Image: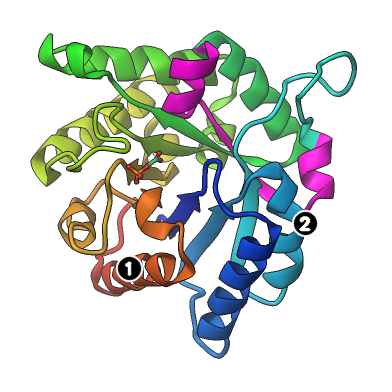
Amino acid sequence: MRKMMAGTGWKMNNSVAETLRYAETLAAWSAGRDLSALDLFVLPPFTSLHAARTALSNTPVAIGGQNMHWDASGGWTGEISAAMLCEAGCRYVELAHSERLQHFGETYAAVRKKLDTAMHAGLTPILCLGETAPEKAAGRADAVLEAQVLTALAGQGAKHIPDVVLAYEPRWAIGGAEAATPDYIAERHGRLRETLHAHYGKAAAARTRILYGGSVTPENGPAILAVEDVDGLFVGRAAWQAEGFIRIIEVVADAARTRRPQG
Ligand code: PGA
């Protein structure tokens, strides 16, 4: 059984003061609720990690970084190491978000090194995968996704693959007006799981979680979660306020209650 997830990447939003308000709202809402069926996370900006960690310490909501460097230390101005994220209380690190690829020239070859470092540090990588609009139009989505995932996971043994969380985030759907349709998501997630099966075996494929992200809302979430291969939602705009994230968590919790065991 794959544990379902609800998470949000805040991108360059939420100051320390805003983070404290967000986290306090979330902590008050989650107090006394049984959320043990889910893995929940927020990815604040680096400067808000400490505040988030402190204010969420008695909640089931974990925190993570939005990026990190592959090296342990040294002359990498502006970068953050895996150990620094761990020290700040992170359980997760997001890698290969499309905005990192598009605006900062990040490549999956670099992501492979980051992922390896993250795994050794005990962080859970949230590995983003997604095709661009032209790649989709050319019918190349699955080939692109396969190349991305195999590049990023190269060198990892099959038994470690379920320690990575995959996030299918079509680049054309991020920050847009509409999410991908459930049918389209079902095809991409299904093919990704087949790729994992072919390269890492049945057990790894059955146990690895694949989230969907890209214009998710509380309204479209239930139909996306009705897709059997979708193991949770990874949300931007709709969860930048605590109230929005709470609605997303409720949607995922509902889906987890009704889901049949897989794997
Ligand atoms: P969005 O962002 O939900 O605002 O489209 C998703 C993401 O960037 O992960």
Q: Nearer the viewer, residue 140 or 229?
A: 140
Mark 1 = which residue? 256
- Pick out the residue farthest to the right: 74
Q: Residues within 10 Å of mark 2 (few under 14, many from 20)?
A: many
Disc 1 residue: CB within 8 Å of ligand 1: no
| Residue range of the region highlighted in magenta in the rendering | 83-107
Q: Are marks 1 and 2 in contact (CB under 8 Å)?
A: no
Question: Distance from label 1 to label 2 (Cα)?
Answer: 30 Å
Can the viewer see residue 60?
no
Seen from the viewer's position, the closer of residues 58 and 21 is 21
Mark 2, residue position: 50
Q: Which percent across, then down, holds residue 174?
A: 31, 35
The quarter of the picture where residue 84 lies is: top right
Using residue 222 as the reference point, say whether residue 174 is left or right of it. Answer: right
Report the residue at 80% width, 19% height from top.
Answer: 71
Give SS at disc 2.
helix
Identify the amino acid type marked 1.
Answer: Ala
